[in-house]
Image: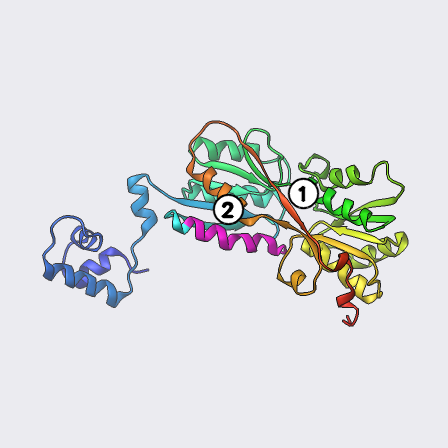
Amino acid sequence: MITIKDVASRANVSPSTASRALRRIGYISKETHDSVFRAASELGYIANSTAQQLKKNTVKTVGFIISDSNNEYYFSILTDIQKMLNENGMNLIIAFSSENPVDEETCFRSLIASRVSAIFFTPTNKQNAEIIRIAKKNGIKVVQLFRDIYEDIDTIINDDESGCRQAAEELLTLGCKKLLLVDVEYRYLESDKVRPDRSTGFLQAVNGRDVQYRILRFPLVDYDTAVLASEIDGFSPDGIITATNVAGLEVLSHIIRRRLTSVRFITFDDNRWLQFFSISAIRQNTEILTKTIEETICTDTDEIRKIRIPQALVLRDSCTVESLKDIHI
């Protein structure tokens, strides 16, 4: 890696003079200035901004731990988050926990060592309370996203409970009598302790109604599509809600293979392919989410905040998937 010492040697000046010239600090003759910039250009030198920030104790780097690399929703929001951070003069470091608390702790330790100012993550369980305490002791703001598992840290969540209730109510309004919620599970996720809970919203809609219903938790790691297909065929629902676009794709694949195009279908995580095929979806408000993350980063307060982001039910083609009837898988 090219260092300031290499630039100084090429320009025949001291490292401190080269550094001051590049940062335009103090008086530097035009000849020296031009010589240093020419050397930096020839060598391809880029200043280590993190090192400069550490000297000033003004590190502005945010860590984002993605829990599920297969879920494109995380990557769809990262574009807006990255833009927002850039506008605030901040950098972004991305890490992956794979819904594993051991990997999650490793990510925390790496981000703490990198001197980030804030860490956003989606927790799986309460196993990492100690590393969170260490992060906070080092002056790092820790915020959990999408799951409210730790009571004592800031939380920003999409209101999945309300979103699922809206979806179920819409399917009931359309005349569905057998509703299936395909929720998700991970090996280490303590689903019964996760808030908000889609299942709660689903049950709020169906309880007291003359309908049959079932909740199926679909493992998003090492899943068996045959088991999922068997559960769907065994129950024969006329309305299905899926908790993520990953689960949604698997269910839609089965619907297409079995030509169940009259089944009404709604999935979480609206995206472009759902829009293209006119499939109804529950849309998270990325704009409000990004703005809330910005306010959380930029606001210095000891108050623990629990913020819910509203979601919108986007209805297309009366929730049927007729547009997919001619597709073969």
Mark seen at residue 103: none
Q: Secondary structure at mark 1?
A: helix
Q: Quadrant of residue 21?
A: bottom left
Picture residue at 52% right of the left edge, 53% below the top: 78
Task: Estimate the x, y position of residue 116 in percent, counting from the top left.
Answer: 42, 42
Q: Nearer the viewer, residue 111 or 235?
A: 235
Seen in the picture, residue 70 relative to 256 is either above or below; the reply is above
Amino acid carrying label 1: it is: Asp
Task: Estimate the x, y position of residue 165 in percent, counting from the top left.
Answer: 74, 42
Mark seen at residue 290: 2
Q: Quadrant of the N terminus?
A: bottom left
Picture residue at 85% right of the left edge, 45% below the top: 213
Q: Earlier in the sequence, mark 2 or mark 1?
A: 1
The residue under label 1 is: 160
Q: Can residue 45 be seen from the camera position used here? A: yes
Task: Estimate the x, y position of residue 279 in percent, counting from the top left.
Answer: 71, 59
Q: Which residues are magenta?
A: 70-85
Q: Quadrant of the C terminus?
A: bottom right
Seen in the picture, residue 55 relative to 150 is either above or below; the reply is below
Amino acid carrying label 2: it is: Thr
